[in-house]
Image (cartoon, rainbow, N blue to C red):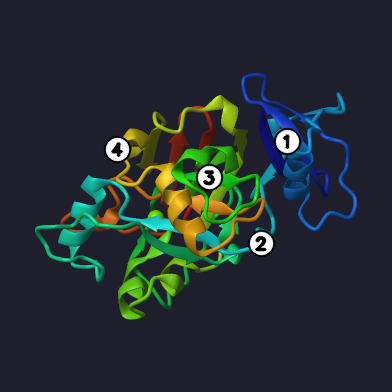
Amino acid sequence: MKIARFEHQHSVHLGIVDPDQGVIDLLPHEAGAADPMIALIERDLAGERPRGSGERVALKDVRLLPPIARPRKNILCVGKNYAAHAAEFTKSGYDGSAKSLTDPIPDDPIIFTKAPCTMTGARDDVLPPWELSHEIDYEAELGVVIGRPGRRIGRGDALAHVWGYTVINDVTARDLQVKHKQWLLGKSIDTFCPIGPWLVTADELDYRNIDIRCWVNGELRQQANTRDMIFDIPAIIATISGSMSFETGDIIATGTPAGVGVGFKPPKFLQAGDVVRIAIAGIGELENRVK
Ligand code: MG
């Protein structure tokens, strides 16, 4: 099942998406929930499966919004989780976390966060602060959304805590990432996390075999499969939950494959007017213009 949060005729709704038919079946209106998608996930976990109202709107007539409006913590992100990307990033000279140029693979997951104010919709513009940065980069990533809360989750139990998946562009200001040593500011600029176009429930995908592709202005830049992850989703969940509790609606960006702009010589950073398109098989696409 695919569930979107979207704006239609000046109000915000949730709905069950049928991308083949190009329609969304509206879910009964949520009143009072701080975050309607998190409320829906919590009811689903309690056994109340989402059911459309029968009232349909065309996908082309809606503005897709970040599926979760207010996650309870920052978006949790994994750095250097594909070997070819770890190598390109270390060679780029922008990687302060590398052990050495010849050994770019981390021994343990690198975890950082993006602030929730970065989230923007699947078709919305990315708005770089050009006065601060001219080294804006894209990172196509599979997003994981947590359902059942928990802490100290073992590998074997990890998938039971995954409610669904989405597509994330972990947009990054490389110069700020280097300048401020820690990655938070370079990763947390408003609009620097296009996310969506909706959530797909975990039963529809095999996390070990999901194709990820990214194009800039139609040129294919990233192409990989989740089987190439250094730390798989159970390992990521076990690692993060060893330190902090997961809550329903928490979002994990699982790392980007090779082919980011900084990996090219010279780097291919994003410019105003560029369009970044990310497709993840079984989920859908993001397409965002850089203003
Ligand atoms: Mg990333």
Q: Amino acid at mark 4?
A: Asp
Disc 3 versus disc 1: distance between alpha carbons? 27 Å
Q: Disc number at residue 72?
A: 2
Identity, as a three-letter code, of the amino acid under mark 2 = Arg
* Residue that label 1 marks: 61
Q: Contact, CB < 8 Å: mark 2 with mark 4?
A: no
- Answer with the quadrant where ligand 1 appears in the image: bottom left
- The quarter of the picture where the N terminus appears is top right
- Whether pointer 1 and pointer 2 mark residues with C-beta atoms closer than 8 Å, the reply is no
SS label for mark 4: helix
Residue at horizontal 69%, vertical 35%?
A: 3
Residue 144 is tagged as 3
10 Å crowding of disc 3: few (<14), some (14-19), many (20+)? many
Q: Is residue 283 above or below residue 277?
A: above
Query: SS of the residue at dot 2?
Result: loop
Disc ID at residue 228: 4
**Residue 71 position within the rendered picture, expressed as x and y whole percent measured from the top left:** 65, 58
